[in-house]
Amino acid sequence: MRHYLYIWHDPAARMLVASGIEFKDAIPALLDADGIVLRGGSAGTARKPAGYQTLARQQLPALAHEDIHAWGSHAWADWHGAPPAPGDVDVATMLDHRGALTPLAALRSRFLAFAHDDGWYLKLLYVAWGDVAALLAGTIPPALGALDLDALERGGDGYWLQAGAVQVELKTHDIDSVLNRRL
């Protein structure tokens, strides 16, 4: 986790937007999945979606040591049960952000994430709020500040956490505008 957290929630879209959460921060919440599908680097084209790799749960801790920031953009979704077939077009399309903006039911996913510059921008789509609350509870260090997860769940405001203080912030996908004011 970076030394700050910017976060907001859109309950209607089942979407959380954050800056400050890195992929390695989500790994503990993914260890009860059977694995993830992961697309590193840029998305493909409409005719040829980018490839992805399927990683079993046992492979996830090693990702904490990868330089995921160097990938630029990446996307991932967890899976439960059987892994997707290699080259599954539905999975590739979902990870290219052109499919439905929800985790694939066939994967029995809880999360679908799109990130840019690991830790800079994260859009996390989810199935159940309880999974997001558990991920955040295990991710946000107390030194950043005490985020009211019930208020976040309602989705009214965005929040900035840094050095033990929590402040209300605008909800925007323009992470640069927030970080340029705050950092």
Image (cartoon, helix red, strand yellow):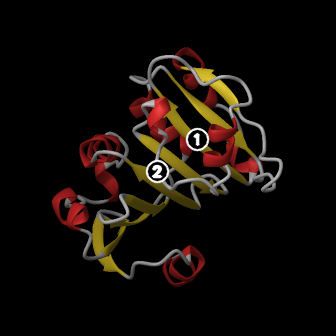
> In the rendered view, would you say 110 is above or below 145?
above
For marks 1 and 2, the one nearer the N-term is 1
| Disc 1/disc 2 C-alpha distance (Å) | 12 Å
Residue 166 is drawn in which quadrant? bottom left
Residue 9 location, x and y as percent? 34, 65
Q: Is 140 positioned to the left or the right of 19 in the image? A: left
Badge 1 density bin: few <14, some 14–19, many ≥20, Cα 10 Å: many
Residue visible at 55% across and 24% down in the picture: 61
Which of the numbered marks, if any, corresponds to residue 12?
Answer: none
Q: Nearer the viewer, residue 30 or 144?
A: 30
* Residue matched to label 1: 76
Q: Amino acid at mark 2?
A: Thr
Residue 100 location, x and y as percent? 53, 54
Residue visible at 60% across and 19% down in the picture: 59
Q: Which residue occupies the extreme left position in the image? A: 150
> In the rendered view, would you say 47 is above or below 36?
below
Residue visible at 81% across and 55% down in the picture: 45
Q: Amino acid at mark 1?
A: Trp
Observer able to see residue 53: yes
Q: Secondary structure at mark 1?
A: strand
Residue 72 location, x and y as percent? 74, 54
Residue 66 is drawn in which quadrant? top right
Residue 95 location, x and y as percent? 63, 46
Task: Confirm or deny contact between disc 1 and disc 2 (CB under 8 A).
Answer: no
Badge 2 density bin: few <14, some 14–19, many ≥20, Cα 10 Å: many
Q: Nearer the viewer, mark 1 or mark 2?
A: 2
Label tally: 2
Q: Secondary structure at mark 2?
A: loop
Which of the numbered marks, if any, corresponds to residue 102?
Answer: 2
Observer able to see residue 64: no
